[in-house]
Amino acid sequence: MQNYLEGLNEQQRVAVEHMDGPIMIVAGAGSGKTKVLTTRIAHLMNKGVDAFNILALTFTNKAAAEMKERVEKALGNTEARNLYIGTFHSVFARILRGEAHRLGYPNNFTIYDTDDAKSIIKDIVKEMNLDDKHYKAAYVYNRISAAKNSLIDPAIYKQDTQIQQEDARTTRPLIGDIYDAYAKRCFKNGAMDFDDLLFKMYVLLTHFPEALAKYQGRFQYILIDEYQDTNLAQYAIIKMLGARHENICVVGDDAQSIYSFRGATVQNILQFQDDYEDVQIVKLEQNYRSTQTILNVANNVIGNNKNQIPKELWTSNAEGEKIMLVRTMTDNDEGRFVADAIKEQQMRNHYANKDFAVLYRTNAQSRSFEESLRRMNIPYRLVGGTSFYQRKEVKDYLAYLRTIVNTQDEENIKRVINYPARGIGKTSIEKIIVRANELNKTFWEIISDPETSGVRSSQLENFVMMIRSFQAMLVKQNAYDVAFAVGKHTGLVQELYNDKSVEGLARYENVQELLNSIKEFTETPDEDGELKEKSLGSYLQQITLLTDADQNNDKDADVVKLMTIHAAKGLEFHCVFVVGLEENLFPSSMSLYDRADLEEERRLFYVAITRAKERLWITYANSRYRFGNLVQNDASRFIEEVPPMHLDKTFTGISNRPAVGSFGSALDRSFDKMPSLKKLADKLAAGAPPAHTPSADFAADDAASMAVGMQVEHQKFGFGKIVTLEGGANNRIASIDFGTGHGVKKIMLNYAKLRIVKS
């Protein structure tokens, strides 16, 4: 047997060698908690504790397998295979298999996954003659799941005044009845869903004293990893199992408690000392991952939380470089900056793609980074998410837009013809396809000409009329106006808005982000500040080129990682970009009115910071499109909590470039790099007006001081008169008549440089 205690620092060794009584190991980020946990198990076994008497609970199967492998390697024998190591759900499923008869279940009970559970809920909603669009299976399932994890059965659910008021407020008063029917259906089928593995374990221990005594006697030593992520059900079960011996070891970090939306409560770890007498507390504060500068920033940020276990991370690693704080003009500029910075770091410091991670608050933010990385041919992968343009709700919306532009595209029509549901079923669609083949016509020709095709229904006629009304808009309206009308009049946006589940909110945010990208496309001026009308067809062309870009081989590990901060927990990277640090985005607008919520947002920022090993960038944008409007942003309050001495501040303003897709050809991009070549090409262009030479005293005036009727000078177009002004203070658009040669141009004043000609 190897000396498993070698290589432990002083505090790690104290945590490992402690034997009896409750102990809380507060393991700071990057402090080697997995090593401590596995070495502690090996130490217990080396001191004579039977493997069958040790219970170790984790949150992932990967962590459980790694722990068992490490213990086996440390001890040099196979005794570790007898350990009860696994996730809460897997260990409790194992116990429930042996005790199922007490609960009236067969020992080989079925375990339903989420899709199975939702399918049953759909059937029950249908049987109860309820509106399945209102009582969506996903929403109902989430309510039932939350109830079980809070140890609330159907009877309590229906009697709880607060719960009933909440369901009444969302006009879903019958969720309790659905829950009751669902529980009975599962029992009848001899099945438990994922949440039942916790709920039924709790029922077993509370309703059958002999079972409680049996497992209290067996599990003499209990170890729980990531204790800050436990919920009420997990807490109650652990409390009961450990009540006899109280040899409970919890490992975690309150500063990394970020899963309250899953039912996790940070109070479990904060109040551990109140649950047991003579608790030994060991703090692992030496970090083996990051530079001291990164840790200084993390310490300062998390120090602003009132509800916490104080700790101070330190390292023997190098001091490291300052953190880069980068402000950009727009969110698309933010995406371009990140892609440029990755390229620069690769050339200067020889990092591989896999050394970089881009971390954001919500999945909807991935769009600008995906587009910029693709334009730069930097391979990337979204972790724990789907590429923005591959998300179902985005593809549904784009299918409507493509149908309007090209009704010959049968696949897009079939995708949207009954979404949202309008009574055009699968059988009807199959009949249309058969008739189209018989008459050698397109799908659209069949449904738009019922007299000839013989395929007629009021639902089809309404669908055709709606698409034609959108097509009529194409002539006079820009891409955003048409897209907005589609979302409104099809009911697609309302359909997503009505789903108040976590997943539903994410889908709604994604379609809003799609609309934001279209809005920015229509309002992005060229390099001269000129604002041109941009059609839906031209937008879809750019998106098609973007989304049809060659995809990276999933097996290729050398890719930049894009992910939410929640998905990044437990990971580490040499270089990390934490993006979107703006008020109402990070921290989220939904967290600003409750201290507990705001402190969880700060913990989320702390987790993001501590993923970085060597270099860290914090970025935010002055403006970004939200719900179709250009919103001016304040920097996140969290930025103010970073000590200025650790920051290297910079600003990049590159917003005159197109926001979406690769609008120019390869030659145009060459011109960007060779201004002289572009000037020559301009002069050679047929019919080009003579170039304007700016006045010797040319100096741009404040856009806010400009008014209709003023004479102005543009560096390229020359002298002109302001004909009209529209828009708000931050996005004023002027129509300026430059006379012969250039005519009337629409100019976005915030981007163009104009001099007021004084008489």
Image (spheres, grey):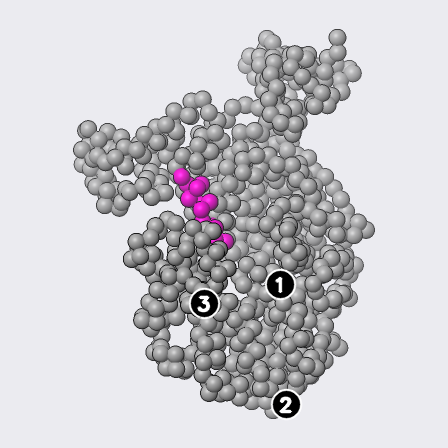
- Residue beneath disc 3: 156
Labelled pair 1, 2 in contact (Cβ < 8 Å): no
Front one among 95 and 651 = 95
Q: Earlier in the sequence, mark 3 or mark 1?
A: 3
Q: Amino acid at mark 3?
A: Ile
Q: Give the extent of the magenta segment.
A: 491-504
Q: Position of residue 432 (x, y in %)?
A: 23, 39
- Residue beneath disc 1: 257
Q: Amino acid at mark 2?
A: Lys
For the residues labelled 1 and 2, the Cα–Cα distance comes to: 33 Å
Would you call the spot at circle 1 few (<14 residues within 10 Å), some (14-19), or many (20 or more)?
A: many
- Residue beneath disc 2: 47
Front one among 715 and 169 = 169
Establish if 114 lies above or below 5. Answer: above
Placement of the N terminus among the 4 image quadrants: bottom right
Labelled pair 3, 1 in contact (Cβ < 8 Å): no
Residue 376 visible at all: no
* Residue 426 included in the magenta stretch of the image: no
